[in-house]
Image: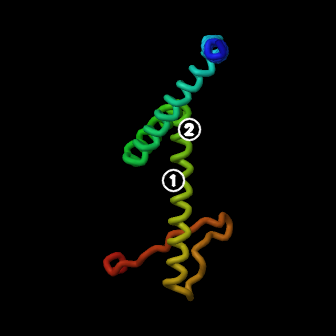
């Protein structure tokens, strides 16, 4: 009988272990189907997809820097098209005025360098640059 008793004890022990394992698996399955667990798994899957997409975008940008940068600049310009339409004429006028002022200064500096003994070509009353009159041989005759 001791053999039968030992076998029954071993079978009861195995049965308790199997039952415990089944309860653990059942708890895991219950936890997996809870709404919070489903949401967490969904977040993880979405996060993985977003990471994959971001990696693909970075790789494409590394492979095609200039076309993408030009497209981005054009897109930003298109977004700001209305303000550009209203402010562009004034801005171009200011740039032209600044360019004319710079060229006038360079011409004035070049004239004084060419003829250091000549008086300044600035009008004393208005402080404006006066164009020097050039004497051609034909006009003198």
How crowded pointer 1 is (Cα within 10 Å; few <14, some 14-19, many 20+) is rated as few
Query: Is residue 29 among the parts visible in the rendering?
Result: yes
In front: mark 2 or mark 1? 2
How crowded pointer 2 is (Cα within 10 Å; few <14, some 14-19, many 20+) is rated as few
Label 2 sits on residue: 87
Kind of element beneath mark 2: helix
Q: Which comes before the other along the chain, label 2 or label 1?
A: 2
**Residue located 42% across and 44% down the image:** 59
**Residue located 50% across and 71% down the image:** 107
Q: Quadrant of residue 60?
A: top left
Rendered image: mark on residue 9: none
Instruction: State whether residue 8 is above or below residue 114.
Output: above
Instruction: State whether residue 133 is above or below residue 67.
Output: below
**Residue located 51% across and 78% down the image:** 111
Residue 68's spot in the image, x, y percent?
41, 42
How much space separates mark 2 and mark 1, taking CA atoms?
14 Å
Label 1 sits on residue: 96
**Residue located 51% across and 47% down the image:** 92
Query: Is residue 85 among the parts visible in the rendering?
Result: no
Q: Quadrant of the C terminus?
A: bottom left
Kind of element beneath mark 1: helix
Residue 103's spot in the image, x, y percent?
50, 65
Q: How is the image coloured?
A: rainbow
Which sits in the foreground, 37 or 49? Answer: 37
Residue farthest toward the front in the current orientation of the protein: 1
Instruction: State whether residue 86 is above or below residue 98.
Output: above
Residue farthest toward the bottom in the current orientation of the protein: 117
Q: Quadrant of the N terminus?
A: top right
């Amino acid at each position: 009988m001791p053999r039968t008793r030992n076998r029954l004890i071993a079978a009861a022990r195995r049965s308790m272990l199997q039952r415990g394992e089944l309860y653990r698996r059942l708890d895991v399955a219950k936890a997996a189907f809870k709404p919070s667990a489903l949401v967490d798994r969904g977040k993880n899957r979405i996060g993985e997809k977003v990471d994959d997409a971001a990696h693909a975008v970075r790789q494409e940008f590394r492979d095609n820097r200039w076309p993408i940068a030009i497209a981005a600049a054009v897109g930003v310009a298109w977004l700001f098209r209305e303000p550009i339409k209203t402010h562009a004429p004034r801005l171009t006028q200011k740039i032209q005025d600044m360019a004319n002022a710079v060229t006038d200064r360079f011409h004035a500096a070049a004239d004084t360098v060419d003829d250091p003994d000549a008086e300044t070509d600035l009008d004393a009353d208005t402080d404006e640059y006066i164009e020097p009159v050039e004497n051609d041989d034909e006009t003198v005759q």
